[in-house]
Amino acid sequence: IAISLLGNRVSFSKLIGPINASLNWGDIIAISISWVALTSGTLSVITFMLDTPQVETRLLVGNANLFIYLVILAPIIEEVIFRGLLLNRLTIKYGAVPGIGLSALAFMAMHLFTGILMWPSQFIFGFISGCLYLRSKTLVSTVALHSIANFLNFFIIIFFQGSALDLQYGIVALVIST
């Protein structure tokens, strides 16, 4: 990424946007919490309704490197790629709504490994992040949103020992998200 940015003479500070932007941090935190509650709850209810087996992710538990990757590195790298580079190019070429939609589709495609039940969730998260980026004009807001959401998901993995939420927790999560 860095070589591509330098080779194309893209200013990293211009790409990130104003660091001291007047962001409403309360809204960013509220969106993150609502988002994780909504997706966790929806996933648990759908898993129950379809009687699909719970996905085990116990291998992830207890791995400090995973925390660093999920909460710090992935949000920075993914936001630079999908919002900073891709969304900027797509909005110039196609306009705001198609640009947001296409970058959200690319974000979802990069997360295909999460399983088919998570694909709509990944697309919507990409769309929300795209809207937030175009409104705030800084990657600081989307990196914060992404980091908080990933931190909450990491906490759920640890708390529920790598298993999907049981139905009762899923319903509570859905209620919280509203």
Image (cartoon, rainbow, N blue to C red):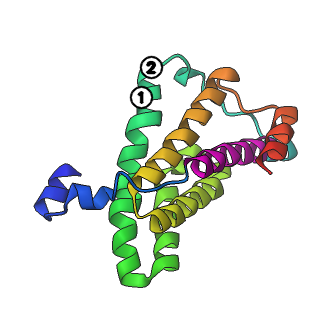
Q: Secondary structure at mark 2?
A: helix
- Which SS type dominates the magenta stretch? helix
Q: Amino acid at mark 1?
A: Ile
* x then y, percent, for residue 48: 84, 41
Residue at 80% x, 43% y: name it: 176
Instruction: Judge whether 95 appears above or below 73 on screen.
Output: below
Which image quadrant is residue 17 in?
bottom left
Q: Which residues are magenta?
A: 25-45
Q: Is residue 161 visible?
A: no
Which image quadrant is residue 83 in?
bottom left
Q: Is residue 134 magenta?
A: no
Where is mark 1, residue-wise? 68
Between the C-alphas of marks 2 and 1, the distance is 7 Å
166 left or right of 68 in image: right
Foreground of the two, 55 or 69? 69
**Disc 2 vs disc 1: Cβ atoms closer than 8 Å?**
yes
Instruction: Judge whether 65 appears above or below 25 on screen.
Output: above
Checking the image for residue 156, the label placed there is none
Q: Is residue 38 magenta?
A: yes
Q: Secondary structure at mark 1?
A: helix
Q: How many marks?
A: 2
Where is mark 2, residue-wise? 64
Residue furthest top as drawn: 62
Q: Amino acid at mark 2?
A: Ala
* x then y, percent, for residue 10: 19, 63
